[in-house]
Image (cartoon, helix red, strand yellow):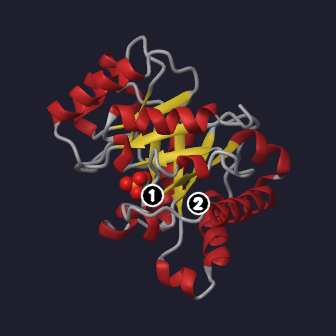
Amino acid sequence: MENQKIVIANWKMKLGLKESLNLAVEMKERFKDFSGEAGVCPNFISLPEIKRIFTGSVLKLGAQNVFWEEKGAYTGEVSPINLAEAGCEMVIIGHSERREYLLENYEMIHKKLKAVLEVKGLMPIVCVGEEKDERKTNKRDFILVDQVNQAFGGLNIMENQRIVVAYEPIWAIGSGVAIEPSDCDYAHKIIRLALNELFGAKISNQSFRIIYGGSISSKNVADFVNLDNLDGLLVGGASLDAEEFYKVAEAIVGGK
Ligand code: PGA
């Protein structure tokens, strides 16, 4: 799994049920000859139906959120087991939009991650990333290391467990302007060092992929393909069109 790149679509809350199913059908068709690893994270209500649509496709299904308990009186929440039952193979944890609008914090992210790691076959995609102000004041490195430590500290990670860390500088998301590729590479290096520190270089390299998210499109993806420390992309806006997402996927997973 080491160095195998991955591309993941995050459809957020941008599509209705019908729109989601239609796009899933288009994606399946567009990705029919794709041999890399690609995932699609639609809204909860579309999951079982899209699982059905993706039968026989290389595309994997993912969710955008999860709760940390297995079962119980937690109105409105969905457990990791439920996601696995719906056919999910990955789940985004702690996206910055949830941190902003739902006050999700890294204590919650840690609990979610721990619960997800207990479900075999469900790969967590843990989001980290600094705010614009934090960047301006040169706090980025500290913020990233702190987020990684809070999310992963104290967890027992096995060799070849599959975990993705998504570096998403908050100010680049949905802005139309991605971060400078060299900045991305640097931030990924910081995250990698924090993971090395926590788990040792061997487990860090074998089990963790570090991907970037924030205004990636077919127009700028070429600038990112050859970065040393980039293991893939998390794509929002550009994943809402099958052709556009395919171009991004082909560039990144086919690169290097
Ligand atoms: P964007 O979103 O590609 O639209 O900037 C990325 C994300 O939020 O995961």
Q: How crowded is mark 1: few (under 14 residues within 10 Å), some or many (20 or more)?
A: many
Q: In which quarter of the image is residue 28?
A: top left
For discs 2 and 1, the disc positioned in front in the rendered view: 1
- Residue type highlighted by circle 1: Gly
Instruction: Answer left or right for 72 relative to 211.
Output: left
* Place of residue 71 in the rendered image (x, y in percent of width and height, measured from the top left): 35, 40
Q: Which quadrant is home to the N terminus?
A: top right
* Place of residue 42 in the rendered image (x, y in percent of width and height, measured from the top left): 31, 38
Q: Who is closer to the viewer here, 30 or 162?
A: 30
Q: Can residue 147 be seen in this view?
A: yes
Q: Quadrant of residue 20?
A: top left
Q: Looking at the picture, does residue 85 appear above or below residue 134?
A: above
Q: Is residue 62 visible?
A: no
Q: Who is closer to the viewer here, 223 or 15?
A: 223
Instruction: Look at the numbered discs 2 and 1 and tell me whether their residues touch, using CB distance below 8 Å.
Output: yes
Label 2, on which residue?
A: 151
Instruction: Answer left or right for 63 relative to 233.
Output: left
Residue at horizontal 64%, vertical 67%? 183
- Secondary structure beneath dot 1 equals loop
Q: Which quadrant is home to the C terminus?
A: top right
- Secondary structure beneath dot 2 equals helix
Q: Who is closer to the viewer here, 62 or 70?
A: 62
Quarter of the rendered structure image containing ligand 1: bottom left
- Residue type highlighted by circle 2: Ala
Q: Residues within 10 Å of mark 2 (few under 14, many from 20)?
A: many
Label 1, on which residue?
A: 94
Residue at horizontal 51%, vertical 61%? 168
Q: Looking at the picture, does residue 76 appear above or below residue 174?
A: above
